[in-house]
Image (cartoon, rainbow, N blue to C red):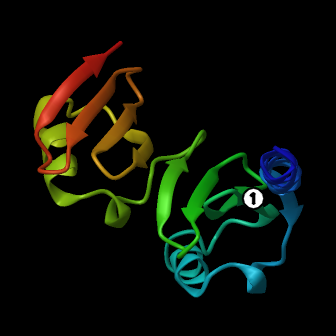
């Protein structure tokens, strides 16, 4: 019985220690971002000034947020691949929008621009300047529309 109690106590202590360090945001310099993130910023956001770059240490890895002085924000996974681009005062750079999604928006909403795009393992979510939110699967088929 004492062995089970010790194992349980050890497990609880380990869990508390791990969760205590998860979700901690820490400011970082541009040079501390993953190389892929640096390249994306240099290529597509060169004219924007970074107000804050930070890393969030999570239980299963890291993620990075870069906030520009104009309010635009881009999030990266631990490898430096963008996961969320939010351009509050401008449109998402067209080179970062998959061609099929850009074509769909141009055809069906020619007056709208893409202000935000988010991707995960299964979907892409796009917010347009006309306040519509479109969701696409990985094959770029429209699967949902919210207004």
**Quarter of the picture holding the C terminus:** top left
Please state if 61 lies on the left or on the right of 81 as rendered.
Answer: right
Q: Nearer the viewer, residue 110 or 75?
A: 75
Q: Residue at x 82, y 53 (%)?
A: 3
Image label count? 1
Q: Residue at x 55, y 46 (%)?
A: 87
Q: Secondary structure at mark 1?
A: strand
Residue 23 screen position, x and y as percent: 78, 50
Read off the residue under disc 1: 56
Q: Residue at x 57, y 76 (%)?
A: 37
Q: Nearer the viewer, residue 60 or 39?
A: 60
Please state if 113 lies on the left or on the right of 4 as rendered.
Answer: left
Residue 108 screen position, x and y as percent: 13, 30
**Quarter of the picture holding the N terminus:** top right
Residue 58 lies in quadrant: bottom right
- Name the outermost residue toward the top: 147
Please state if 104 lies on the left or on the right of 27 as rendered.
Answer: left
Residue 22 screen position, x and y as percent: 78, 53
Instruction: Estimate how packed mark 1 is, as few (under 14), some (14 to 19) or many (20 or more) residues with alpha carbons within 10 Å.
Output: some
Q: Nearer the viewer, residue 75 or 127?
A: 75
Q: Residue at x 20, y 29 (%)?
A: 109
Q: Is residue 34 above or below residue 24?
A: below
Residue 146 lies in quadrant: top left
Q: Nearer the viewer, residue 89 or 81?
A: 81
Q: Is residue 4 above or below residue 21?
A: above
Q: Is residue 38 above or below residue 45?
A: below
Q: Is residue 38 above or below residue 96?
A: below
């Amino acid at each position: 019985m004492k062995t089970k109690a010790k194992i349980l106590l050890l497990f609880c202590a380990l869990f508390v220690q791990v969760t205590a360090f998860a979700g901690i945001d820490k400011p970082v310099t541009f040079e501390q971002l993953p190389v892929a993130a640096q390249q994306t910023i240099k290529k597509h956001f060169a004219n924007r000034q970074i107000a804050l770059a930070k890393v969030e240490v999570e239980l299963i890895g890291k993620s990075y947020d870069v906030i520009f002085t104009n309010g635009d924000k881009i999030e990266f996974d631990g490898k430096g691949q963008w996961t969320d681009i939010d351009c509050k005062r401008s449109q998402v750079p067209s080179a970062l929008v998959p061609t099929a999604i850009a074509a769909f928006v141009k055809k069906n909403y020619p007056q709208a621009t893409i202000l935000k795009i988010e991707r995960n393992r299964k979907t892409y979510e796009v917010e347009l300047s006309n306040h519509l939110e479109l969701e696409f699967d990985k094959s770029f088929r429209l699967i949902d529309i919210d207004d």
